């Protein structure tokens, strides 16, 4: 099993450009999450999904949109990138029931200039 | 709102020393607490998960404890090795309806000196 994979690994965008980050998991997990990690601030939840076709806002959702059209995929979109969105983005997935341990992907390093 | 704090932000110890990493949280209605390891430029690797009904979990040289009443968790690393050098993150999970949200601390960067 590949676990949780993320595409791309690195990306540089100019302000105002758009892009989509792809997360895929092969563990048949119901729940999927997108986090961002900034220096000295730990990880913060952007959006999450509790099942195919459902999404919900996390702690820092502004400027991002998500979609969960297939159970195994969770997409994070930036419609108009801003320098404040420079960060490392992590995707995670879990089962809904205990212990509901979250498994993380390797991350996408995004720079917005 | 759950807040998670890890102190110190950085720790340096000589090889072979036993050490304790601290994690504190504000909401005692915690569902579980998870400890992660993160190597530079890499993703997060789950080390231990403690359910709210448990008091500790062990894996090899690692032992994690959870005290909900005091809002604290500790990660004990026995006989530290240079390969243990990494950033250690704790995260508390809270439950609201169908949501299972993890709140992360900012991590402790551990350096084990040979």
Image: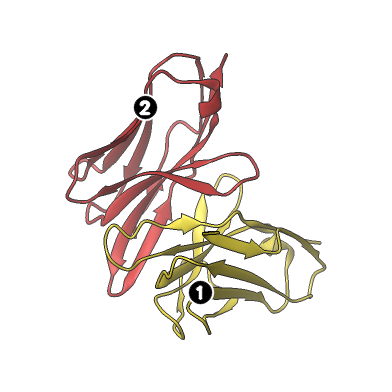
Would residue A70 appear left or right of B56 to someone viewing this image? right
Rounded to the nearest angstrom, the CA distance separating label 2 from label 1 is: 34 Å
Q: Element under label 2?
A: loop
Residue at the spot of label 2? B61
Nearer to me, A59 or A1: A1
Q: Position of residue A71 (x, y in %)?
A: 47, 78
Quarter of the view holding residue B16? top left
The chain ID associated with circle 1 is A
Question: Which chain comes out yellow in the rendered image?
Answer: A
Q: Position of residue A14 (x, y in %)?
A: 82, 68
The x and y percentages for residue B104 are: 44, 51
Is residue B98 visible in the rendered image? The answer is yes
Q: Which chain is red?
A: B
Closer to the camera in the image, B90 or A84 = B90
Name the disc covering residue B96, or none. none
Q: Which residue is mark 1?
A: A72
Q: Position of residue A90 (x, y in %)?
A: 57, 59
Callout 1 secondary element: loop
């Amino acid at each position: 099993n590949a676990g949780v994979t993320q595409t791309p690994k690195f990306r540089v965008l100019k302000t105002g450009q758009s892009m989509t980050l792809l997360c895929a998991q092969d563990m048949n997990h119901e729940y999927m999450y997108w986090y961002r990690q900034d220096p000295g601030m730990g990880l913060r939840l952007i959006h999450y999904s509790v099942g195919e076709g459902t999404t919900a806002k996390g702690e820092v959702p502004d400027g991002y949109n998500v979609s969960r059209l297939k159970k195994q995929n969770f997409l994070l979109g930036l419609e108009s990138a801003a320098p404040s969105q420079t960060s490392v983005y992590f995707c995670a997935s879990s089962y809904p029931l205990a212990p509901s341990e979250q498994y993380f992907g390797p991350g996408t390093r995004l720079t917005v200039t | 709102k759950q807040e998670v704090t890890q102190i110190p932000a950085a720790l340096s110890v000589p090889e072979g020393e036993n050490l304790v990493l601290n994690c504190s949280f504000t909401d005692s209605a915690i569902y579980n607490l998870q400890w992660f390891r993160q190597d530079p430029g890499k993703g997060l690797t789950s080390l231990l998960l403690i359910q709210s009904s448990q008091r500790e979990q062990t894996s090899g040289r690692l032992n994690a404890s959870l005290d909900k009443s005091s809002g604290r968790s500790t990660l004990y690393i026995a006989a530290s090795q240079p390969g243990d050098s990494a950033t250690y993150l704790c995260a508390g999970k809270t439950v609201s309806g169908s949501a299972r949200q993890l709140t992360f601390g900012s991590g402790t960067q551990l350096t084990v000196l040979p």
